[in-house]
Amino acid sequence: MTQRIKIVLDEKEIPREWYNIQADMPNPMRPPLHPGTLEPIKPEELGAIFPMNLVEQEMSTERWIKIPEPVMEKLAIWRPSPLYRAVNFEKAIGTKCKIYYKNEGVSPAGSHKPNSAIPQAYYNKISGVKRLTTETGAGQWGCALSMACQMFGLDLKVYMVRISFEQKPFRKIMMETWGAKCVPSPSNDTAVGRQILKDFPDTPGSLAIAISEAIEDAVSSKDTKYSLGSVLNFVCLHQTVIGLEAEKQMKIAGDYPDVVVGCVGGGSNFAGIAFPYIRDRIHGKNVRIVGVEPNACPTMTKGPFIYDFGDMTKLTPLMPMYSLGHSFVPAPLHAGGLRYHGVSPLVSQLLNDKLMEAKAVNQLDCYKYGVMWARSEGFIPAPETTHAITAAAEEALQADAEGKEKTILFCWSGHGLMDLAGYEKYFSGTLTNYELPDHEIEKSLASLKGYPKI
């Protein structure tokens, strides 16, 4: 292998503030609505499931929000994360383009998720909360929050989407190692879970179901709040440390991206790498921003921009987002973190305003490029991360075909050492593509008739 190019920052270069893109958006995000009154949600109503210090961040339009010192101390365990130029991968795919990646897999939990898990645990702790509940898809968020809760002395219960619980058993063990309790969702531990198991005993589960269970648990338990690993404004806010560091590192490299890429499930890692560059785009920089998702769950590329619930049983506010409908249960693809019916309202507004683009890719292409990546760069990527790798490779090859030499930056959101079952199926030839048919989307969206439109 050729020596890769690695750009590191000193610990003092960790961002001291989070960047809030709401301060720069040309069109403000539409407000979330109360599910009963259909009026804009009030802060105190969100306070039923979140501590008020996080609710304040959710509704803030202040451009810069200071990172508390106890959070900085924990982030410094692994931040700043390294930025690499993927010289060997460039050679493997035969491109003249430059491909850089921000490696978020170096965190103790192996993904970008601790960037929000740590501040969420901190803010809950100082609010007097003793226990959290949450959902997790592929398990990265459950692992990150388990670690963060252990750091701040909080109990945690994780509802893990059933198909991922079965596909990725070692993630459950990671959560238990950090002191959390993890159960498959739907479970027999909540009324929501019991009803879904009764009606659909063979369901693979979904993030929407797991969210419903976690919220039911939180509102019915003492000293307990709910924690969410993506979608919400404050989660996107916390993740901007990724892009803020990347800006400094790209400057050291003497380069600036023509294209910035991130995979999108709910939108957290994408927001982290992209929002600082979307700010540049808003202020006149010539940079394209691309969010990539699976063809099996094409929320941004096939879903409408509508008001929808974040969970299956309509316990959350109605949120303005691209959505496939809250009752949608995605196919059991291995990129469990991308199996969500909706997308962050902030990401949705930016997509609607054409400040970013969306594309969908097939599972087999993702594993093809994931294997090429492992054999050239060394790191084995998570299935979610392979979507960003695939989009970056396709951008490079398209630029080559057009006779252009572009600089591409993407977020390497996590390693795949807990996701090897998918690679095993790929090598055995049993992994398949699945493209969601339009009639399934129409069926799912039928449940939203009568709700406010955008």
Image (cartoon, helix red, strand yellow):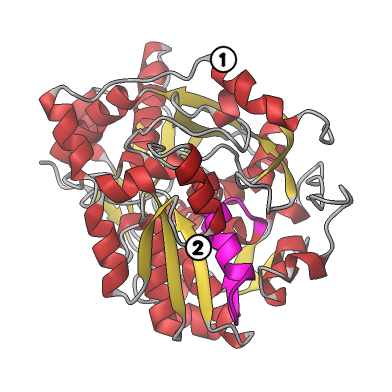
Residue 339: which numbered mark, if any? none
Asked if residue 420 is positioned above or below residue 57 in the image, the reply reads above
Q: Position of residue 387 (x, y in %)?
A: 38, 34
At a point 35% along the width and 33% down the height, the residue shown is 333
* SS at badge 2: strand
Task: Please name the amino acid that badge 1 sits on.
Answer: Asp
Residue 319 located left or right of residue 430: right
Residue at mark 1 = 438
Is disc 1 surrounded by few (<14), some (14 to 19) or many (20+) residues within 10 Å?
few
Residue 228 located left or right of residue 249: right
Q: Nearer the viewer, residue 430 or 391?
A: 430
Q: Position of residue 324 (x, y in %)?
A: 60, 30
- Sequence order check, earlier mark of 1 and 2: 2
Query: What range of the chain is rendered magenta?
Result: 210-233
Q: How many marks?
A: 2
At a point 49% along the width and 52% down the height, the residue shown is 194
At a point 42% along the width and 45% down the height, the residue shown is 337
Q: Position of residue 41 (x, y in %)?
A: 83, 57
Locate the N terminus and report the quarter of the image it occupies. Answer: top left
Asked if labels 2 and 1 touch by Cβ distance under 8 angstroms, the answer is no
* SS at badge 1: helix
Q: Nearer the viewer, residue 25 or 416?
A: 416
Quadrant of the image occupied by residue 377: top left
Task: Please name the amino acid that badge 2 sits on.
Answer: Thr
* Residue 387 on the magenta span: no
Residue at mark 2 = 134
Is disc 2 surrounded by few (<14), some (14 to 19) or many (20+) residues within 10 Å?
many
At a point 49% along the width and 34% down the height, the residue shown is 329
Locate the C terminus and report the quarter of the image it occupies. Answer: top right
